[in-house]
Amino acid sequence: MDAASAPLSLHLIRVFDAPRDLVWAAWTDPEHLAQWWGPVDHPASTVDMDVRTGATWRNCLHGVHDGRDLWQNGVFKEVTPPERLVFSFVWEQDGERGVPNEVTVTFEDLGAQTRMTFVQGPFETTGERDGHGYGWGSSFDRLAQYLPHFSQSGGIAVQRQAHHHIFVIEREFTYPPALVFFGYSNEDARRAWFTGPPDWERGERKFDFRVGGFEVSEGGPKGGFVSRYEGRILEIVPDERIITAFMMYIDGAPMTASLSTVEFKPGDYGTLLKYTEQIVFLDGHDHLPQRIEGSEGIFDAFEIYLEAQHQKKD
């Protein structure tokens, strides 16, 4: 086989200033892999990995600038701790970033350092190979920055971060404030619209609408992550305002802490609803566009609920 017809593969070698066991843990523990997986402009927003031979993995990269979600998945073909990983790799959007191929990662013990050799292929074009080269290269830069955050006991410590944002969503409904307020605050009504996507499995639900009362809402895709909302109501002004402090968790790990204010004001055609969220993204979970998109989806569901209630009365 001549060079022109030889399969195109990506070869990368990095030497990390960390022992092999810890580099292996950074690759195989989903909590820590989420801290560095994906290039700097497309960090991982979802990591679902079961690192066993024959088991599957599925991760999502989220575009910092364009807000796009890029899903990738594969199957672990070989897991030999702490020496070697082999897994298949494919982008879920056919034709966008290449064809299915295979990744092999080996870890060589250099004492206080680790030599990692990464091979991926085959690729159909040099452009596809080089594009993946940028992505993995940036990911490994992030891994090198993350590895010094080890605990003295030998485990990996999550890099603690707190990124602050604020966003506002405004909606106008053709119903009076009292009706919109009821739909937002009544337990039975809220169960009808304050949920995730229709295909999510539902978990624990609680709602105690009073000052100092708590709300819990849990769910997630079948076989996937578990999203959990825990909130405490700080203020209620009937038909006018609700202020809530809440936390969001993914698989038990804290993702965000927020203070939300919902205002209900009379408008020309009904009710003006203004939702303001002051949010702190914790420990690398800084995905504001995704959070805004999810919140917009919740208010879409609320609008559908109000319309359905209106039609029932007609």
Image (cartoon, rainbow, N blue to C red):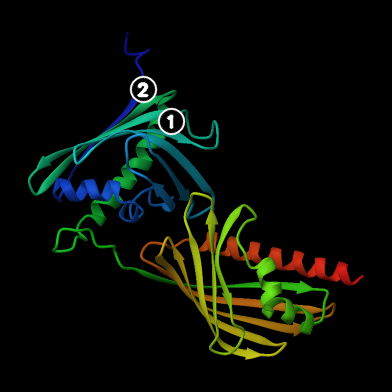
Callout 2: helix, strand or loop?
A: strand
Seen from this angle, which residue lies furthest left?
111
Q: Residue at x 48, y 59 (%)?
A: 226
Residue 13 in the figure: left or right of residue 190: left
Query: Which residue is labeled 1 in the image?
Result: 128
Locate the N terminus and report the quarter of the image it occupies: top left
Q: Is residue 268 above or below residue 162?
A: below
Q: Give the numbered dot on residue 22.
A: none
Locate residue 214, reporting x and y percent.
Answer: 53, 81
Q: Residue at x 34, y 52 (%)?
A: 30
Q: Amino acid at mark 2?
A: Leu
Callout 1: helix, strand or loop?
A: helix
Seen from this angle, which residue lies furthest right?
314
Locate the C terminus and report the quarter of the image it occupies: bottom right
Locate residue 132, reporting x and y percent.
Answer: 39, 36
Picture quarter containing residue 207? bottom right
Locate residue 163, reporting x and y percent.
Answer: 41, 70
Confirm or deny contact between disc 2 and disc 1 (CB under 8 A): yes
Locate residue 211, reporting x and y percent.
Answer: 57, 90
Query: Which residue is labeled 2 in the image?
Result: 8
Q: Amino acid at mark 1?
A: Glu
Q: Nearer the viewer, residue 173 or 198?
A: 198
Q: Residue at x 57, y 75 (%)?
A: 206
- Rounded to the nearest angstrom, the CA distance separating label 2 from label 1 is 9 Å
Q: Residue at x 46, y 48 (%)?
A: 60
Residue 250 in the figure: left or right of residue 14: right
Q: Is residue 170 above or below residue 78?
A: below
Q: Nearer the viewer, residue 224 or 41?
A: 224
